Image (cartoon, grey):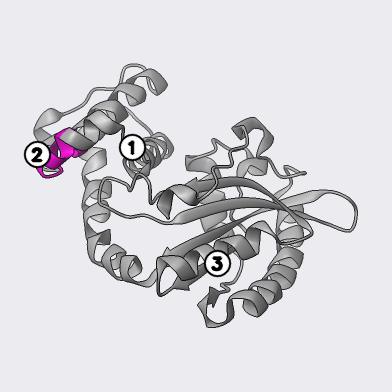
């Protein structure tokens, strides 16, 4: 079942909103939220979760930390999710989205094939909604299993521990904004699915410690390239 989910991937440089004006993005997102919210409610029933638009302050912080000030790269101002009782029901929910008219599915990320370092998995979709003027607004849909949502709430504390330790690990010499960008980068790497068959074997033998260490190693290697001159306090790393 897991491998039956189609892999759809659009290059990052094409995953941009039609405008870099955040006010326009929010106007478009409001329209998408209304139309897509109704469609998902009709198709998913009680499984559909229709939140409000992403808080403006949160969007601005994410743009600063993750997208380095590029307003047109944020893709989850309009966002939706579905909570399903079984994998079969989740697949039905996914197929409903894939067949929906008026949108183009740009990305389907199947985290069930390779869960993150703490075992979390879902289906993450980026899709483009065609607006009346012919432009497309990119929005996000996440499909979850009820049981994994419960587990996610329990392990969230570990992400928070990691988040708190990162400023001590990178040390002094960085501004608050740079430290936040480093923090977002490391946590993003830890949340990514980067597992191959060899890692799976070693993970099984090591009870997860190897994978955690490997991802930290890769994260810091990329961090060093992105922020030349950064010094890692490995005594602080031990606390993780």
Residue 143 horizontal side relative to residue 184, left or right = right
**Quadrant position of the C terminus in the picture:** top left
Answer with mark 1 or mark 2, whichever residue precedes in sequence. Answer: 1
Where does the image place residue 150, in percent across and percent down from the top left?
30, 71
Give the secondary structure at mark 1: helix
State the separation of the CA atoms marked 1 and 2.
22 Å
Q: Is residue 8 left or right of residue 17?
A: left
| Location of residue 9 with respect to 22 vertically, above or below | above
Mark 3 vs mark 1: which is more N-terminal? 3
Residue 60: which numbered mark, if any? none
Residue carrying label 1: 186
Q: Which residue lies at the image location 31% right of the left edge and 32% below the top edge?
A: 196
Name the residue tied to disc 3: 92
**Of residues 3 and 236, which is closer to you in this image?**
3
What is the span of residues highlighted in magenta in the rendered image? 202-213
Q: Mark 3, residues whose alpha carbon is within 10 Å: few (<14), some, or many (≥20)?
A: some
Callout in the foreground (1, 2)? 2
- Determine whether 230 is above or below 34 in the image: above
As measured in the structure, the alpha-carbon distance from the residue carrying label 2 to the one carrying label 3 is 36 Å
Q: Are marks 1 and 2 in contact (CB under 8 Å)?
A: no
Q: Judge whether residue 78 can be spotted in this image.
A: no
- Residue at which label 2 appears: 206
Q: CA distance from mark 3 to mark 1?
A: 34 Å
Q: Are marks 2 and 3 in contact (CB under 8 Å)?
A: no
Where disc 3 sits, the SS reads helix
């Amino acid at each position: 079942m897991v491998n039956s989910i189609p892999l759809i991937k659009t290059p990052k440089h094409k995953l941009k909103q039609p405008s870099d004006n955040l006010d326009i993005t929010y106007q478009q997102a409001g329209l998408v939220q209304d139309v897509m919210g109704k469609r998902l409610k009709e198709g998913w029933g009680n499984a559909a979760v229709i939140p409000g638009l992403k808080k403006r302050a949160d969007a601005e912080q994410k743009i600063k930390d993750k997208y380095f000030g590029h307003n047109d790269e944020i893709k989850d101002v309009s966002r939706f999710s579905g909570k399903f009782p079984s994998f079969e029901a989740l697949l039905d929910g996914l197929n409903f989205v894939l067949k929906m008219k008026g949108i183009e599915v740009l990305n389907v990320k199947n985290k069930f094939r390779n869960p993150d370092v703490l075992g979390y998995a879902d289906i993450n979709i980026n899709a483009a909604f065609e607006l009346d003027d012919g432009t497309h607004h990119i929005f996000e849909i996440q499909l979850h299993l009820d049981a994994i949502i419960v587990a996610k709430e329990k392990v969230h504390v570990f992400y928070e521990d990691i988040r708190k330790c990162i400023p001590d690990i990178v040390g002094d010499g960085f501004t608050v904004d740079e430290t936040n960008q480093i923090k977002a980068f490391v946590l993003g790497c830890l949340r990514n699915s980067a597992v191959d068959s060899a890692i799976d074997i070693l993970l099984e033998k090591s009870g997860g410690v190897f994978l955690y260490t490997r991802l930290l190693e890769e994260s810091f290697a990329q961090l060093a390239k992105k922020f030349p001159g950064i010094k890692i306090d490995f005594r602080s790393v031990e606390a993780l």
